[in-house]
Image: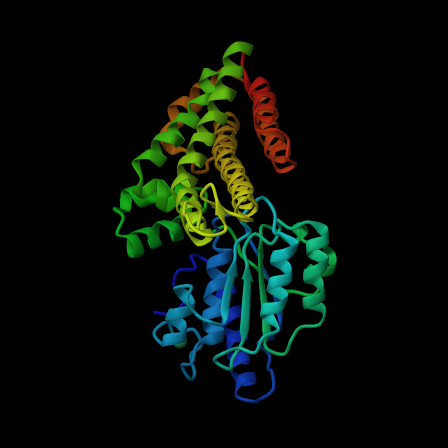
Amino acid sequence: MSVFADLVGQERVVAQLQAAADDAARLVRGGVGGPGGMTHAWLFTGPPGSGRSVAARAFAAALQCESPGQPGCGHCEPCGQAMAGAHPDVAVIVPEGLHLKIKEAREIILRSSRAPTRGRWQVTLIEDADRMEERTSNTLLKAIEEPPPHGVLLLCAPSVEDLLPTIRSRCRLVPLRTPPPSAVAEVLVRRDGVDPAMAAFAAQAAQGHVGRAKRLATDEEARRERRDVLSLPRSLQGVGSALAAAADLVATAKEESVQLTRDRDARETESLSKALGVGATGKGITAGKPRGSAGALKDLETLQKDRVKRTQRDALDRALVDLAAFYRDVLQLQLGTRCDLVHADLSLEASQIARATTPEATLRRIDAVLACRVALDGNVAPLLAVEAMALALRTG
Ligand SMILES: [Zn+2]
């Protein structure tokens, strides 16, 4: 099966990338570029879960594919290696903390200037390229302005506005769209063996986020958390209950992020300690700690704290996306539009709120949820932002 098979509902993007990969294969054979428009810098944009990094990985594989005539065949060795994250000429960079560090950017540039070991392209894929400070962006810009002959840079970000104009103007754009629920449900059934009714529910509730749909379809805990978040609108009757609900929501997100990162943190600390020889005894070692190890462990601790913060923000953001959709459902019921509700399983709850309030009040509530997302994105303390939202959502 082609490396592009898992791209859900993105026919135009697949055609664009296949044409470019054809072009790239011609260039590798010593020919000239054609209408496919192969170039050195690419920017994949799309809402979270639309598959921008899936698309970038598939493209990386297609560039390394050695099958004649069908780049991205999916069965040759380079295709398999690239898709499994094991190709020597494909590096995937995921910013670990809240931001991509300037040191990481320098390594990326160094790497992309090396000759590819298998003679094709030296591909560097940066997920969340929007998480870059300006000076890091400027460092990266140099690599884009003067690309090494075999270097290919694939950047992923939610939208073009998330990157500096100087960077985005030098990239070829690959805009992914939010895939329709029917396409997401189809892939859950085909790829993951999910029951069709569950797939339809999860695809609708996940609003086009493929990974989220899979989690909802296959993880009872994820479904429980979603229901908890969506029970919020009915529990906000006064100032006291609004503040309590806000504290709950933030605490749940924090707990989830600690759980998600705990095992990995422990593994990393253990292997770094081992590498540094912490706990060993011998010449030159005092109190079981070799000199210099404290700094390295401290760095790791900082990185891990950043990661917990970031995972917590992601969990909160997902909860807010669900909440905003709930109020959009309420608005639809109030206005009598005939569209499918996102949270169809909660139509009773949505109708109750629709009857008890006005469309104007619902619009104000949707604004409050979106304002909270913006505040979190701007690094406002989570509890403060969520409290402000909960107060704006309350009905009494
Ligand atoms: Zn292949």
Residue at 38% x, 33% y is 344
Percent position of residue 296, x then y: 54, 48
Percent position of residue 50, x then y: 48, 52
Q: Quadrant of ligand 1?
A: bottom left
| Number of numbered discs overlaid on the protein picture | 0
| 187 left or right, relative to 305 | left
In which quadrant is the C terminus drawn? top right
In which quadrant is the N terminus drawn? bottom left
Image height check: is 236 above or below 32?
above
Q: Nearer the viewer, residue 395 or 215?
A: 215
The answer, for residue 374, to whether it is visible in the render is: yes
Q: Quadrant of residue 33?
A: bottom right
Residue at 55% x, 80% y is 23
Q: Quadrant of residue 387?
A: top right
The answer, for residue 238, to whether it is visible in the render is: no
Q: Nearer the viewer, residue 348 or 91?
A: 91
